[in-house]
Amino acid sequence: MSVDIVLTETKPDMEAVIEDLKRKLTNVRTGRATVGILDGVMVDYYGVPTQLKQMASVNAPEPQLLTIQPYEAGQISAIEKAINNANLGFNPSNDGRVIRLSIPPLTEERRRQMAKQVHEIAEDHKVAVRGVRHDANDMLKSMAKDKEISEDNERYGLDEVQKLTNTYIAKIDELAKTKEQELMSV
């Protein structure tokens, strides 16, 4: 095993952290209607918890409105109940065929809370990237200890892992900053 193998194994792990961060940030509400807001909603479909997007078509026809059209009309009340139970702060209304979710504009205080939440999510993901770095460094150190690589190669590997870590931490900061700006713009 060489330093290059450790680096090629480390990069996808860090990339996975970034993808998870992107997913989590889409769930943070910005005051605009986005279908991603409902990604975490699970509906009781004949006793089986099922994702809302597997049971209904979700659209954002207007910036402050989401429409949810169930594939099965009989599931409309179960979907409404799931949205209420998800505690998203929305009050669903239906006309028997389509559920409408009016997205209220965010207050300044709520925007600040959301920005703080974005910051916490970003910090958690920075910790995850550092965990990946720690694992890679441990691998390099044990390889050097077992004389699989030289001390110079170990030092080179540790430097490269640190550069990779810095790159991914910068990506996390950039994504969080973009989301915070999105939240704070009225």
Image (spheres, rainbow, N blue to C red):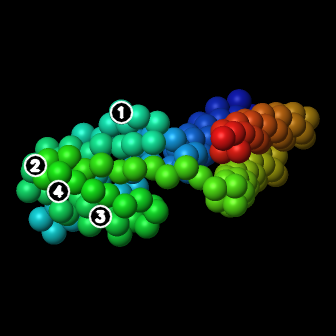
Quadrant location of the C terminus in the rendered image: top right
Mark 2–mark 4 distance (CA, rounded to whole Å): 8 Å
Q: Which residue is mark 1?
A: 61
N-terminal-most mark, 1 or 3: 1
Q: Residue flagged by tag 2: what amino acid is it?
A: Glu
First of labels 3, 4 by sequence position:
4
> Secondary structure beneath disc 4?
helix
Q: Earlier in the sequence, mark 1 or mark 4?
A: 1
Q: Residue at x 57, y 41 (%)?
A: 22
Q: At which x and y percent is residue 94?
A: 22, 54
Q: How far apart, in angstroms, are the residues tagged by discs 1 and 4?
A: 19 Å
Indicate the position of residue 108 as horizontal and vertical percent values. Answer: 69, 55
Crowding at label 2, few (<14), some or many (≥20) Cα neighbours within 10 Å?
few
53 is higher (above) or lower (below) than 128? above
Note whether residue 35 is visible.
Answer: yes
Q: Where the N terminus falls, by quadrant?
A: top right
Q: Which residue is mark 4?
A: 76
Label 4 crowding class (10 Å Cα cut-off): few <14, some 14-19, many 20+? many
Q: Find disc 3 in the rendering and name its residue.
A: 82
Q: Answer whether residue 164 is visible to the viewer in this image.
A: no
Q: Amino acid at mark 3?
A: Ala
Q: Using the numbered discs, state the Cα–Cα distance from disc 1 to disc 3 in whole angstroms.
A: 22 Å
Q: CA distance from mark 3 to mark 2?
A: 15 Å
Q: Identify the residue position indicated by label 2 in the image.
A: 72
Callout 1–callout 4 Cβ contact below 8 Å:
no
